[in-house]
């Protein structure tokens, strides 16, 4: 972790913040001795008020620290209000890192992106099927729906049921898609397996290959929807 000493000149802090594209720097005299944090905001406030701002110590602000055994969700209010929080090892009291609003945005993206991609894929599937499939076609699914419930709208179907429709020769002929049915269904089945993992409460982090599959499927479904015949 990059930090700066309390007695360092202000221009050194500015140089480091510009060089590493940081919005703040911890002000430290050792791994455990934190004096504060210097930020673009703290520098600007001092200068705007005409106060002395020559060294880092002149321009720093109070620290915000969270212990490493706390969850990211517990840190969110502090990060949202102040733009950062330092992380302190609960055992040896060393400062081990800093979490910023930018980190929070990236974490949110990593958590939400799979759900957004899956949602987009399912929307494209509904639009593709909705152009050609009628309620009477849902009879194909009778006996296979959860609890044998009767399906009357395309929105009520699961991803597995969408796949069953695409697999049916009559539906595939009706859609008039000039693509390989086997490859298409295999892609959707990969998406279904990933979706089942994503929806699991105690799931492992999504792999790059899984995320790439969702992105590839999203692009493919978008192209397919754009070029599917309307009549």
Image (tube, rainbow, N blue to C red):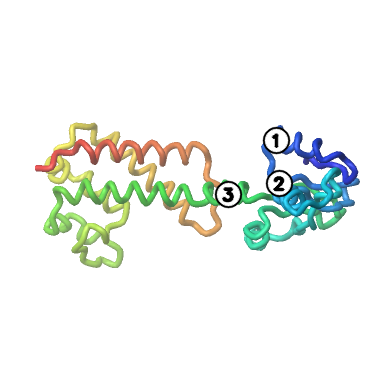
**Residue 149 horizontal/vertical position (percent):** 24, 67
User: In the rendered image, which residue does mark 2 sit on?
Assistant: 40
Labelled pair 3, 2 in contact (Cβ < 8 Å): no
Q: CA distance from mark 3 to mark 2?
A: 23 Å
Q: Residue furthest toward the left? A: 231
**Residue 156 horizontal/vertical position (percent):** 27, 61
Foreground: 154 or 27? 27
Q: Nearer the viewer, mark 3 or mark 2?
A: 2
**Residue 46 horizontal/vertical position (percent):** 77, 51
Foreground: 93 or 63? 63
**Residue 54 horizontal/vertical position (percent):** 84, 43
Give the quarter of the figure containing the C terminus: top left
What kind of element bears circle 2?
helix
User: In the rendered image, which residue does mark 1 sit on?
Assistant: 18
Is residue 86 at least partly visible in the picture? no
Above or below, comparing residue 39 to residue 67 in the picture: above
Q: For this view, does 9 lie left or right of residue 133?
A: right
Q: Nearer the viewer, mark 1 or mark 3?
A: 1
Q: For this view, does 91 lie left or right of residue 106?
A: right
Foreground: 26 or 206? 26
Is tag 3's residue or tag 2's residue first in the polypeptide sequence?
A: 2
Q: CA distance from mark 1 to mark 3?
A: 24 Å
Is tag 1's residue or tag 2's residue first in the polypeptide sequence?
A: 1
Q: CA distance from mark 1 to mark 2?
A: 10 Å
Is residue 106 at least partly visible in the picture? yes
- Residue ID at (42%, 38%): 213
Q: Residues within 10 Å of mark 1 (few under 14, many from 20)?
A: few
Above or below, comparing residue 7 to residue 201 in the picture: above
What kind of element bears circle 1?
helix
User: In the rendered image, which residue does mark 3 sit on?
Assistant: 107
């Amino acid at each position: 972790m990059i930090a700066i000493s309390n007695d360092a000149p202000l221009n050194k802090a500015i140089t480091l913040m510009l060089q590493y594209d940081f919005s703040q720097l911890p002000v430290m005299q050792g791994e455990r001795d934190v004096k504060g944090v210097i930020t673009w905001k703290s520098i600007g406030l001092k200068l705007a008020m005409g106060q002395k701002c020559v060294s880092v110590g002149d321009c720093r602000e109070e620290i915000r620290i969270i212990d490493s055994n706390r969850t990211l969700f517990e840190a969110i209010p502090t990060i949202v209000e102040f733009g950062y929080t330092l992380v302190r090892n609960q055992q040896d009291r060393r400062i081990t890192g800093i979490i910023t609003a930018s980190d929070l945005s990236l974490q949110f993206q990593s958590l939400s992106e799979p759900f957004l991609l899956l949602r987009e894929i399912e929307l494209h599937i509904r639009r593709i099927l909705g152009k050609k499939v009628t309620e009477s076609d849902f009879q194909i699914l009778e006996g296979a729906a959860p609890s044998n419930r009767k399906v009357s709208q395309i929105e009520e179907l699961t991803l597995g049921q969408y796949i069953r429709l695409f697999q049916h020769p009559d539906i595939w002929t009706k859609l008039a898609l000039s693509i390989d049915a086997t490859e298409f269904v295999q892609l959707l089945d990969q998406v279904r397996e990933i979706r089942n993992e994503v929806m699991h409460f105690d799931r492992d982090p999504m792999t790059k290959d899984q995320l790439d599959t969702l992105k590839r499927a999203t692009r493919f479904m978008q192209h397919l929807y754009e070029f599917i015949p309307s009549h």
